[in-house]
């Protein structure tokens, strides 16, 4: 850069900062007389004109600067500012498009595009641009208050747009959805909730064997368990046996969580060795508790009538689960998706709930349900009373009989081998 031109630009910039408009205009004019195509001189001349709301002059200078240095996104952003002042939405969009073509990660360009689309009532485009801007802003280490306010308004706009769009879609599909069966309704509603950002879809996390290609459904449809209604009909008898058992031998209840000595502190520490979450096992990892089973003959008969897995040292398991008042079982996942966990609620005071993945349900006494425990789940008892549920496992209903037999043989072979490590229990 010529020394005299550089000096004139410095003078123009200083005069602009001090508000001496005439001096700034004279200095930049002198620089342009010596270097009419210099992008720095054109840009500064445009900024001085923009300060005076002379948008037409500013646009001409900015366009000349951008054409001289087309790869500089900031120059196209300045063109967009002048076009906005002239209420030329098409010109503003074109300039912002040029800036974003240089760098899609240009946060201010994304914000300006979103603002333009919002002014033009292009709600879908504005929402898309705001989402990009919000994603970019999330990586900023520090955020100026003005930008934080802008982004807060953006989140509100996106949320409102998504809610309106969701309402429009749901109204359109409502007649067809109403004719669908309950399982189809539940799955389609989950699809809509995921599409509109209202819920997360959870996946299997198995600490043991993971059986591929089984549907990762949070709660299994009741149609998979034709025996469930018969089990529910025995809920009163099962509850009575539990109450008699506890009254006669309260010591049968033991802490469900029992960690090895020296286990580092973790999410289970608060429940370790505590009867806040207690259990009375009828079967545990395939081993029958003869004393408890003898005290609960109707419960045992109901369970033995079901198609449970029979894997020595692993399955079945069945127990009364006791959750004391104001207790919480933290979010966790199970061992293998080859099984299904059944809950038969026996004593459920108000304020008890159970979450699997993205759906939280309230237990209903005598109303059983099945779920995949390799999907994150947790439980609450926010009441002042005890909650009791009979819990047991059965095969995953999506496994064929042949697959069940293959899994039983797999475990039998693995357990018999002395050359491989012991597999986790299911």
Image (spheres, rainbow, N blue to C red):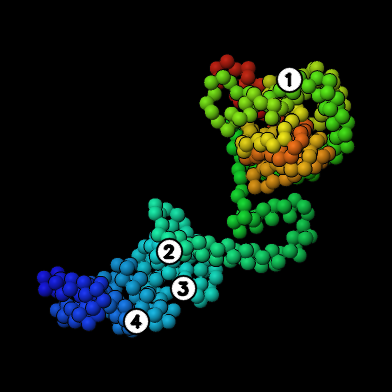
- Looking at the rendered structure, the secondary structure element under dot 1 is strand
Gap between marks 2 and 1 measured at Cα: 65 Å
Q: Position of residue 423 (x, y in %)?
A: 60, 24
Find disc 1 in the rendering and name its residue.
287
Above or below 299: residue 12:
below
The answer to which quarter of the image holds residue 73 is: bottom left
Q: Position of residue 57 (x, y in %)?
A: 30, 83
Above or below 316: residue 156:
below
Q: Position of residue 21 (x, y in %)?
A: 25, 80
Q: Residues within 10 Å of mark 3 (few under 14, many from 20)?
A: many
Q: Earlier in the sequence, mark 2 or mark 3?
A: 3
Compare residues 143 and 133 and report the one nearer the observer.
Answer: 143
Find disc 3 in the rendering and name its residue.
116
Q: Residues within 10 Å of mark 1 (few under 14, many from 20)?
A: some
Q: Earlier in the sequence, mark 4 or mark 3?
A: 4
Marks 2, 3: nearer the viewer: 2
Q: Earlier in the sequence, mark 3 or mark 1?
A: 3
Residue 381 visible from this viewpoint: yes
Find disc 2 in the rendering and name its residue.
146
């Amino acid at each position: 850069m010529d020394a005299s031109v550089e000096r004139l630009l410095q003078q123009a910039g200083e005069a602009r900062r001090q508000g001496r408009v005439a001096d700034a205009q004279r200095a930049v004019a002198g620089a342009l007389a010596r270097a009419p195509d210099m992008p720095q001189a054109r840009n500064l001349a445009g900024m001085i004109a923009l300060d005076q709301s002379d948008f037409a002059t500013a646009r001409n200078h900015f366009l000349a600067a951008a054409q001289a240095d087309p790869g500089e996104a900031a120059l196209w952003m300045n063109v967009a500012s002048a076009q906005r002042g002239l209420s030329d939405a098409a010109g503003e969009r074109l300039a912002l498009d040029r800036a974003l073509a240089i760098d899609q990660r240009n946060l201010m360009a994304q914000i300006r595009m979103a603002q333009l689309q919002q002014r033009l009532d292009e709600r879908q485009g504005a929402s898309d641009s705001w989402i990009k801007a919000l994603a970019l802003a999330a990586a900023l280490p520090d955020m100026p208050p003005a930008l934080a306010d802008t982004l807060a308004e953006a989140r509100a706009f996106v949320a409102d747009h998504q809610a309106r769009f969701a309402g429009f879609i749901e109204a359109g599909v409502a007649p067809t959805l109403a004719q669908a069966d309950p399982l189809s309704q539940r799955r389609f509603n989950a699809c809509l909730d995921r599409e509109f950002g209202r819920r997360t879809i959870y996946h299997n996390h198995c600490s043991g064997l993971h059986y591929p290609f089984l549907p990762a459904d949070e709660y299994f449809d009741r149609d998979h368990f034709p025996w469930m209604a018969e089990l529910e009909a025995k809920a009163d008898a099962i509850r009575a046996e539990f109450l008699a058992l506890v009254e006669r031998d309260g010591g049968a209840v033991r802490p469900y969580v029992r960690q090895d000595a020296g286990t580092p502190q973790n999410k289970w520490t608060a429940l370790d060795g505590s009867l806040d979450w207690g259990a009375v096992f009828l079967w545990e990892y395939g081993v029958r508790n003869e004393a408890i089973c003898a005290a609960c003959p109707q419960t045992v008969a109901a369970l033995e009538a079901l198609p449970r897995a029979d894997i020595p040292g692993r399955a079945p398991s069945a127990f009364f689960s006791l959750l004391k008042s104001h207790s919480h079982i933290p979010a966790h996942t199970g061992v293998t998706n080859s099984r299904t966990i059944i809950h038969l609620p026996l004593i459920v005071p108000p304020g008890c709930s159970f979450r699997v993945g993205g759906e939280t349900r309230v237990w209903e006494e005598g109303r059983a349900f099945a779920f995949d425990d390799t999907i994150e789940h947790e439980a609450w008892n926010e009441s002042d009373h005890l909650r009791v549920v009979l819990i047991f496992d059965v095969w995953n209903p999506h496994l064929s009989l042949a697959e069940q037999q293959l899994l039983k043989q797999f475990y039998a072979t693995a357990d018999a081998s002395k050359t491989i490590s012991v597999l986790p229990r299911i």
